[in-house]
Image (tube, rainbow, N blue to C red):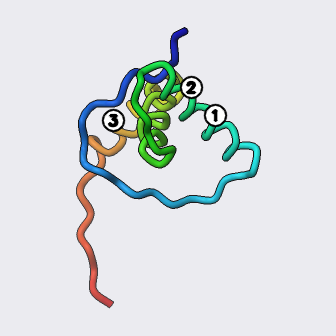
Amino acid sequence: MTLKLDKLPDREAVKITFTASAELKTALNDYAEIYRRRYGQKENVADLIPFMLEAFINADPGFKRARKELENVRASSPPTKATEV
């Protein structure tokens, strides 16, 4: 069995809080259990989520194109100065 998400690298613990539907919570818990069975290592859902999001973003060609365009716009725009009110 293969998963889209590879085994996580060593890292510092990071806490993430967000609101999810009951269906998504169940799916995330199931993913964590399948991950544990695949790699023999228990990971909390909160530890998996950043890597899942990174994998999702890296696999999105539309996002990559739009981000490159955004970077080009930023590079060609003059820096703005903060003004005091």
Labels 2 and 3: the sequence-earlier one: 2
| Residue 75's disc number | none
Q: Nearer the viewer, mark 2 or mark 3?
A: 2
Quarter occupied by the C terminus:
bottom left
Q: Which residue is mark 1?
A: 30
Kindly state the secondary structure of the residue where label 1 is placed: helix
Kindly state the secondary structure of the residue where label 2 is placed: helix
Residue type at the position of mark 2? Ile
Which residue shows up at 40% across the image and 58% down it?
15
Which residue shows up at 34% across the image and 38% down it?
71
Q: Nearer the viewer, mark 3 or mark 1?
A: 1
Q: Is residue 15 left or right of residue 53?
A: left
Mark 2–mark 3 Cα distance, whole angstroms, equals 40 Å
Nearer to us in this view, 39 or 53: 39
Give residue 76's position: percent from left, percent from top. Answer: 28, 42
Q: Which residue is mark 3?
A: 72
- Vertical side of 30 occupied by 21: above or below: below
Label 2 Cα neighbours within 10 Å, binned few <14 / some 14-19 / many ≥20: some
Give residue 37's position: percent from left, percent from top. Answer: 51, 23
Kindly state the secondary structure of the residue where label 3 is placed: helix
| Residue 34's disc number | 2
Mark 1–mark 2 Cα distance, whole angstroms, equals 6 Å
